[in-house]
Image: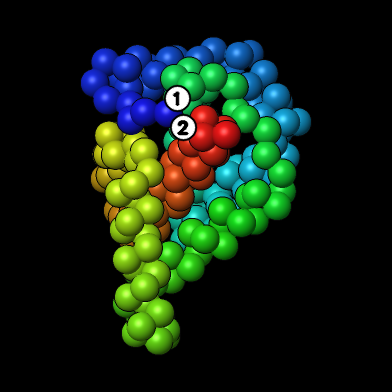
């Protein structure tokens, strides 16, 4: 797997955002059948967390998660099948890393430093789709700017879409490294 940049990234995003309803429905149905735990996480659990803050942002998040799914499929092929255990491992790794980055979270300073360093090293050593993250964050910013009630949810929504992109990157990286 490689980082999507330039023309390749924008072609993948354009593809994702121009999918007709029938194709979109088919993509979602296949994804839900092949990846039920990941689909449940991305399109039910994560949006419900965002909806506690703002329903509009939860809806936007689901659209961007779908776009992310389509970008990865367009650029790297079908979603590689994974087990529920894989998803649980990924979420526990991401959770520990994110907890280390939250300043108000009570945590031993040595553990926080170790996890923060591990997070930085993993992000640096993995193929991180930084340009895709930037595009998604810009979409979130633009959407939130249309209504002041959405602004308070920007950072949380951006963190959640970052998590989605990391999950897809890890998913595709794992299969290319096997």
Q: Which residue is drawn at 27% across and 34% down?
A: 131
Q: Residue at x 39, y 69 (%)?
A: 115
User: Quick one: SS at disc 1?
Assistant: helix
Tag 2 residue: 68
The image quadrant where one finds the C terminus is top right
Q: Going by the image, does 145 lie left or right of 62?
A: left
Q: Nearer the viewer, residue 112 or 9?
A: 112
Q: Residues within 10 Å of mark 2 (few under 14, many from 20)?
A: many
Residue 126 found in image quarter: top left
Residue 49 found in image quarter: bottom right
Q: Going by the image, does 146 lie left or right of 57?
A: left
Q: Position of residue 35 (x, y in %)?
A: 69, 36
- Asked if marks 2 and 1 touch (Cβ < 8 Å), the reply is yes
> Does residue 140 appear anywhere in the picture?
no
> Does residue 76 appear anywhere in the picture?
yes
15 versus 121 height, above or below:
above
Q: Nearer the viewer, residue 44 or 54?
A: 44
Residue at the outermost left position: 6
Q: Going by the image, does 65 lie left or right of 129?
A: right
The image quadrant where one finds the N terminus is top left
Q: Distance between the residues labelled 2 and 1?
A: 5 Å
Q: Position of residue 142 (x, y in %)?
A: 27, 39
Q: Residue at x 32, y 75 (%)?
A: 113
Q: Residue 35 carries which label?
A: none
Q: Position of residue 103 (x, y in %)?
A: 32, 77
User: Quick one: SS at disc 2?
Assistant: helix
Tag 1 residue: 71
């Amino acid at each position: 797997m490689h980082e999507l940049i330039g023309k390749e990234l924008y072609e993948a995003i354009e593809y994702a955002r121009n999918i007709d309803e029938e194709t979109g429905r088919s993509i979602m149905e296949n994804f839900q059948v092949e990846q039920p735990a990941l689909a449940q996480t991305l399109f039910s659990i994560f949006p419900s967390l965002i909806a506690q803050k703002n329903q509009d942002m939860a809806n936007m998040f689901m659209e961007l998660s779908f776009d992310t799914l389509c970008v990865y499929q367009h650029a790297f092929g079908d979603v590689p099948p994974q087990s529920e255990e894989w998803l649980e491992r990924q979420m526990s790794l991401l959770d520990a890393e994110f907890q280390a980055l939250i300043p108000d979270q009570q945590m031993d300073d040595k553990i926080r430093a170790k996890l923060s360093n591990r997070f930085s090293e993993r992000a640096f050593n993995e193929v991180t789709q930084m340009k895709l993250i930037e595009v998604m964050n810009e979409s979130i910013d633009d959407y939130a700017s249309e209504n002041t009630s959405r602004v308070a949810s920007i950072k949380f929504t951006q963190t959640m879409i970052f998590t989605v992109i990391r999950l897809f990157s890890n998913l595709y990286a794992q299969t290319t490294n096997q």
